[in-house]
């Protein structure tokens, strides 16, 4: 029901028909005269944030809630005559979609520079997908959405893609010596990259639930060099195979002169079998116990607490984050001008880093340049 009617109370609810909306505001055109006693219905996969007089008043979980404002049917219209029948007691509700948004694509628009220990300076392209979820609705609205009425995954793709690529470049430079070792380390890279990105995403009230590396590809000329190297490896393996067969033939000929050869060979094979098959059973039973959907770790003390908790029962840390310090990540109160932990101005953002070699602009805490691969 509309929020500009004269008599009736509002019944506010929202359904995402596109499957891509992170945030949807009611009323859609801006703020409205939501009346005292209006009903707000929030679904299980949603959160509702109520703004009144320009401030976030409360965050609501699933269920039906009664909103309280100073707007009274009919009387408010009469009292707002000096403001052209437009009440100054403005209110709006932001619906936040809490589902996990899957199959969001990330990748290098331009190749990133990487110093390979064996191949020298090369440029790589990387592509993959990631899953995203809003975990701090108020912080997400205040830090990223702003006053937009509808906010979709397309709005965050470009920025988050840039953050992922920058962290990918840093992580590659710190952990990988040569791309010749990459195929066996995709899972390890993805896991380490997720851990590195969690802090970046948390500043906006977001969680990176999963990230996958689909491919990391060098330029064609580097691929040809890798293929040539693989062919040389095949010839080396063939030489080793021939040497092994010759040794086995000599051993068999010498054992033919001995009467106890069969028993000796059987014993040798028996001792070798456990080692041959041990690699297939390594790591069995080491799967991590899944975290229940109704709990999550407190960002301050890391104890598991209920998903709907507003304060941590172990350390008292506030879970409903309004905004964070851009320097150290400390949770700030609504009117704070300076961080209580590091003293950094609340509104000031850290300046981007410029590479001393090529002058390219990188994220504030980047460690390697995305243009030339040099350490910053």
Image (cartoon, rainbow, N blue to C red):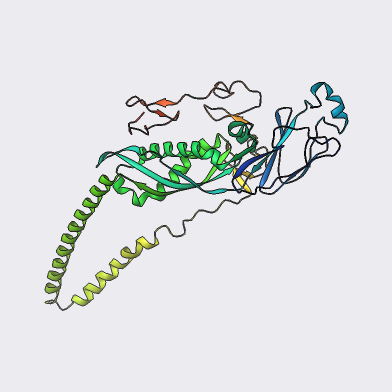
The residue located at (44%, 30%) in the rendering is 363
Q: Position of residue 273 (x, y in %)?
A: 31, 68
**In the foreground, 239 or 130:** 130
The spot of residue 225 in percent (x, y) is 23, 47
Is residue 319 visible in this depiction of the protein? Answer: no
* 116 shown above or below 186: above
Name which quarter of the figure residue 141 lies in.
top right
Q: Is residue 199 above or below residue 210?
A: above
Q: Is residue 44 left or right of residue 6?
A: left
Q: Residue at x 83, y 39 (%)?
A: 9
Point out residue 233 in the picture as x, y percentages from the top left corner: 21, 55
Q: Residue at x 19, y 54 (%)?
A: 232
Residue depicted at 42% across the width and 57% down the height? 283
Rendering quarter of residue 10? top right
Q: Quadrant of residue 132?
A: top right
Q: Nearer the viewer, residue 348 or 128?
A: 128
Q: In the drawing, does residue 79 fall left or right of residue 146? A: right
């Amino acid at each position: 029901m509309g929020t500009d009617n004269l008599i009736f109370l509002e019944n506010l609810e929202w359904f995402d028909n596109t499957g891509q909306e992170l945030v949807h505001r009611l009323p859609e055109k801006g703020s409205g005269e939501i009346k005292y006693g209006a009903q707000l219905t929030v679904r299980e996969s949603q959160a509702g944030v109520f703004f009144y007089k320009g401030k976030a008043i409360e965050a609501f979980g699933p269920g039906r809630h009664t909103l309280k404002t100073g707007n009274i049917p009919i009387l408010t219209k009469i009292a707002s005559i000096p403001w052209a029948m437009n009440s100054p007691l403005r209110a709006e509700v932001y619906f936040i979609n809490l589902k996990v948004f899957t199959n969001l694509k990330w990748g290098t628009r331009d190749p990133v520079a990487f110093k390979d220990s064996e191949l020298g300076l090369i440029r790589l392209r990387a592509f993959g997908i990631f899953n995203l979820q809003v975990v701090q609705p108020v912080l997400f609205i205040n830090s990223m959405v702003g006053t937009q009425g509808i906010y979709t995954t397309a709005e965050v793709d470009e920025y988050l893609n840039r953050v992922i690529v920058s962290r990918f470049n840093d992580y590659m430079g710190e952990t990988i010596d040569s791309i010749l070792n990459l195929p066996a380390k995709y899972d390890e890279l993805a896991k380490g990259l997720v851990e590195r990105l969690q802090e970046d995403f948390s500043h906006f009230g977001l969680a990176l639930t999963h990230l996958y590396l689909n491919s990391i590809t060098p330029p064609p000329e580097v691929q040809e060099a890798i293929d040539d190297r693989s062919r040389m490896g095949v010839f080396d393996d063939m030489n080793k195979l021939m040497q092994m067969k010759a040794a086995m033939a000599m051993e068999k000929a010498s054992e033919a002169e001995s009467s106890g050869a069969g028993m000796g060979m059987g014993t040798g094979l028996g001792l070798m079998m456990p080692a041959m098959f041990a690699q297939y059973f390594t790591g069995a039973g080491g799967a991590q116990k899944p975290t229940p959907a109704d709990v999550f770790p407190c960002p301050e003390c890391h104890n598991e607490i209920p998903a709907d908790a507003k304060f941590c029962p172990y350390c008292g840390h506030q879970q409903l984050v309004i905004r964070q310090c851009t320097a150290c990540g400390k949770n700030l109160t609504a009117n704070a001008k300076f961080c209580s932990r590091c003293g950094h101005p609340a509104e000031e953002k850290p300046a981007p880093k410029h590479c001393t070699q090529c002058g390219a602009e990188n994220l504030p805490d980047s460690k390697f340049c995305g243009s030339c691969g040099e350490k910053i």
